[in-house]
Amino acid sequence: MNNRHPQVPLNASQETASLVKRLAGPSTGKAGLAKDQEDINRIIADVSKGSKFYENEKKKDKELTKKIEHILHLRDELTKNSGVDLEKIEANVDQILHKLECQRDLSQTIVHFDLDSFFASVEVLNDPTLAGKPFAVGHTVLSTASYEARKYGVRSGMATFIAKKLCPELIMVSHGMSDYSEMSHKVMAICNRYDPQMCPAGCDEGYLNITAYCAEHDMNADACVEHLRSAVFTETKLTVSAGIAPNTMLAKICSDKNKPNGQFHLPFQSEAIKSFMHDLPIRRVPGIGRVSERLLESIGIKTCGDIYTYRATLSLMDKQFGLLHLLRTHLGLGSTSVQPPQREERKSIGAERTFPPLGDKQKIIEKLQEICAELESDMEETQWTGRTITLKYKLSTFEVFTRAKSSNRWISRKEDLFAVGHELLLPELPLTLRLIGLRVTKLKDLRGPDPSIGIKRFFDAADSSSSNKKQKVSASETAQDPPEPEISENTKPTSKPTSFRKEKPESKSRQSPLERETHACPVCLKQVPTENDAFNAHLDSCLSRGAIRQAQAEASPSSKQAQGNLLERWTKMAPNSKKKT
DNA sequence: GCGGATCAC
DNA sequence: TATGGTGATCCGC
């Protein structure tokens, strides 16, 4: 490089490496990266420069940089504190690792499958002249790109005009939604033969437990998955990649290894798994996104092997980083069960729309009405109602805000949605908006538990012993139903709300502040005497409780990422940062 | 319960 | 000229 003559036109703004990377978008770096990713990121940053989107990304990047400074400062304070014994902390962590290792379960054969550039492949089937050409599916933002387009750095989630800059001959194809849905169902049905309990994770991927299938058909895992992939191809002409591993997290990572149209089988041995994890970039772990990657990198952690190196820091900063989850990741542990998604596990239903920036109050309200109509229709089709409404709006500057209100009535009609949405929106105006959305939570299922027997609904409240094992949630909610605006339901909205099924790790244990020989348990955060026996005893009970929580959290691998406490809150936005444009 | 934020697809 | 929609979860308050 010629330093005297930078290729890039001099920009007074000193772009940080992190901003340039951030602008490249969330999907860059998750999978295989192009050789000249640096150049590509440079082009993306230059094309974006000056836009409101760019300015917002810059602001967020700056805030993250500040958070990192804070975290590093905290780390230095904790580490340099003369009271801490790093070796002892490491020894404690090593004990946790040992106990986690003892819980390792290698008995289940889990598969993660993933259709190769699903939308793009379907489009090629519809129009074979697209084969081998760089093209992308989407409108303003790309849903997916063909493998030829990816060579240019074109990625899903990328703005179309940027993709065109990277690849001027890029062909744009718009969505053919019905085709995708039909193909998706076909593929899921095929996979279902191998595990009736399979769990779809989106329209183009899913998890299977093929342990039983392999046993019953006297087949090894490789042959089974080849069989599956071959069935998918002959019946749909779509190629699929797959990972075979002893748990869902590893299987997911492995399905990327030989993509496209390949499979990868991780040896089912502790040592092989740990060596696989050792060099794995932390960003490949499901749940670790761009922000967590930066936070972890700031303390020196780039790979899952680095987690061990910095275990003392992570232990001291468990609140910020979530030690236990990272240790499990380091060891390559994950959920060993696959369950089909349960309808009653749904937590919210919503709709949102982006439009050219609007400042006019009447026009904004019209957008809100459109959203309400859409949402009413979705809720009607899926038979949900709910009592908390959350308004979401995005300013023309790309800043996002939410405003929520809980009601004591069930809301699903568009008039009711609008009344609450309007009430939430009005005090915020005037604003220039580019997006409005509504989301309903605190849901109630309007569908009877057994749709084939209509009259049965009538007895629901008393009928806890029926064949419906999963009625637990419905039953408890029935007891706390607010007055029902409709006719059918409850005979009697009886008593008080029953407590919800959310166990928290008892954050409020008040211990003697002068206890000198205690250390925060990295699992439950309680202060525990550091003496070996006491610490061990505590750890045992804590880990077994933790294992239960973990199993629950991972019951449905698709929807319940164990993500989280990597980030503490730093600054609070002024709730009303009104911008006029 | 509310609001901000992260993450996956 | 120009950067999506749906759903989940977690944290701090």
Image: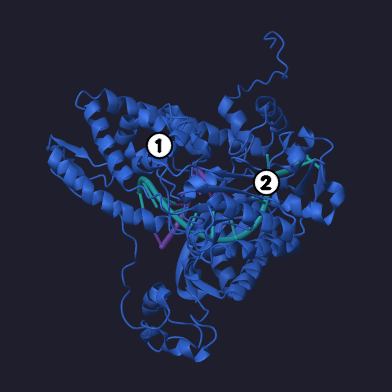
Chain colours: A blue, B purple, C cyan
The quarter of the picture where residue A206 lies is bottom right
Identify which residue, A169 or A540, lies in the foreground.
A540
- Answer above or below: position of A141 versus A553: above
Location of mark 1 (residue): A271
What element does badge 2 sit on? loop
Which residue is at 24% across, 50% downward? A542
Q: Could you tell me the amino acid type at mark 2?
A: Asn
Quarter location, residue A376: bottom right
Residue A364 to residue A79: above or below: below
Q: Which quadrant is the C terminus of chain A positioned in? A: top right
Q: Which amino acid type is marked by label 1?
A: Glu
Which residue is most to the top? A4
Chain letter, disc 2 residue: A
The chain letter for the residue carrying disc 1 is: A
Q: Residue at x 27, y 22 (%)?
A: A80
Does residue A313 appear left or right of residue A30 in this picture? left
Label 1 and label 2: CA atoms lie apart by 28 Å
Return the residue nearer the eye: A432 or A352: A352
Few, some or many C-alpha atoms within 10 Å of disc 1 (few <14, some 14-19, many ≥20)? Answer: few
| Residue A71 placement, left or right of A122 | left
x%, y% of residue A194?
56, 62
Instruction: Give the residue pinned by disc 2.
Output: A261
Image coordinates for residue A306, horizontal then vertical, percent: 41, 29
Indicate the position of residue A460 as horizontal and vertical percent values.
42, 85
Which one is nearer the viewer's eye here, A364 or A144?
Answer: A144
